Amino acid sequence: MATIETRLAEDGTKTFRVKVRIKGQLPQQASFARLTDAKRWAQSTEVAMREGRHFKVQEARRKTLTDLIDRYLRDVLPQRPKNASNTRRHLLWWKAQIGYRLLADIQPAHVAELRDQLLSTPTDRGARRANATVQRYLAAISHAYNIAIKDWGWVDENPVAKITKPRSARGRERFLSDDERDRLLAACKASRSQFLYTVVVLAISTGMRRGEIMGLRWKQVDLPNRCLRLSETKNDTSRSIPLAGLALALMTQLSKVRRIDSDLVFYGRDKAQPIDLKKPWETALRRAGIDDFRFHDLRHTAASYLAMNGATTVEIAAVLGHKTLQMVKRYSHLANSHTANVVASMNHKIFVQP
């Protein structure tokens, strides 16, 4: 309920003092020179208090972005361990830039200005920061804001949601030609590393991510059913990956000589840690004479081979563990010849020429 008191100063000027009282909440008051302003404030404040929004406004005027980020790092990030180190780095960057500002004062324009700063400022290595990287900076602070809105009631709006995000670059489509594949596999087989050949065959055969392969444990290897069972993936979903051909043979062979003091399939000198194959991999690429190729391109290679052998985008997404089809649409053009053959076969059966 709102009440308005009229006060008369010694010089004859009037002021209007407004008090808003709602049961269960602290009373709010303010003074105005005009009665219309007093009535407008009383009405909006009473509505906000009844809807629970006034408390948020108060919190936004008391809390800074530093308060928001510190609480997020303390209470939320430990529950999201995947990529936590990068998320922490991104949030600390925002904190260093505008952490001193009150949440109520941060506008979309401030976020947009810092977005442009990220895009235009070179990295420590002097390279241009990729659009995808800037997207991750924005995603980190956006999620923190969403938690502050939904769980803490500190703010009403997310300023990151109101700005334009950098457009993602077209996905990389580098994959091995038949000749390159043969040369690379020969170089990996000749490597001094006992695991490089198996790891590369597994990557090409299954399309698994590097982290999924290197973190693979024997309890996830189901040789009787010819598959690998991943309970934790990048997309937070479990999936079963079929094993066939050379990959199955190599994993079967490896299982016969596995160590009893480590559950890791591809262990390093420290049996509790995966092996580091960076140098053996680079050496194999150099000896095979393959340029402009990264380990992650083995995943593209697997997807491309699937497409060229008739797999649909839905099937490719299932094998690679993508939640949506957007990521695998880049391979659809590789299936054109297969699609043409399907259409030709259908027409031949239906429209048989005399």
Image (cartoon, rainbow, N blue to C red):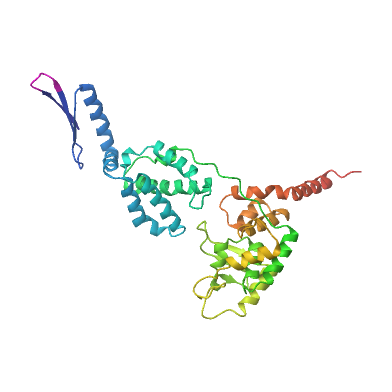
Nearer-the-camera pick, 33 or 52: 33
The answer to whether 42 is drawn above or below residue 232 in the figure is above
x, y percentage for residue 205?
66, 63
- Quadrant (top left, top right, bottom left, bottom right) of the C terminus: top right
Q: Quadrant of residue 106?
A: top left
Say if 124 sits above or below 11 in the image: below
Q: Residue furthest left?
A: 10
Image side of residue 200 versus residue 238, left or right: right
In the rendered structure, the answer to whether residue 9 lies left or right of residue 164 reads: left
State the residue in front, 326 or 138.
Answer: 138
Residue 202 shows in the view? no
Q: Where in the figure is residue 134, as x and y percent of width and height? A: 49, 46
Where does the image place residue 206, in percent across and percent down from the top left?
64, 62
Give the residues drawn in magenta, as a range.
9-14
Q: Residue at x 39, y 49 (%)?
A: 144
Asked if residue 251 can be seen in this view, the reply is: yes
**Most frequent secondary structure within the magenta stretch:** loop
268 or 319, which lies in front? 268
Which image quadrant is residue 52 in? top left
Farthest residue toward the top? 12
The quarter in which the N terminus is drawn is: top left
Location of residue 23 with respect to 180 vertically, above or below? above
Give the vertical position of 293 relative to 279 (above or below).
above
Residue at 39%, 56% in the rendered image: 77
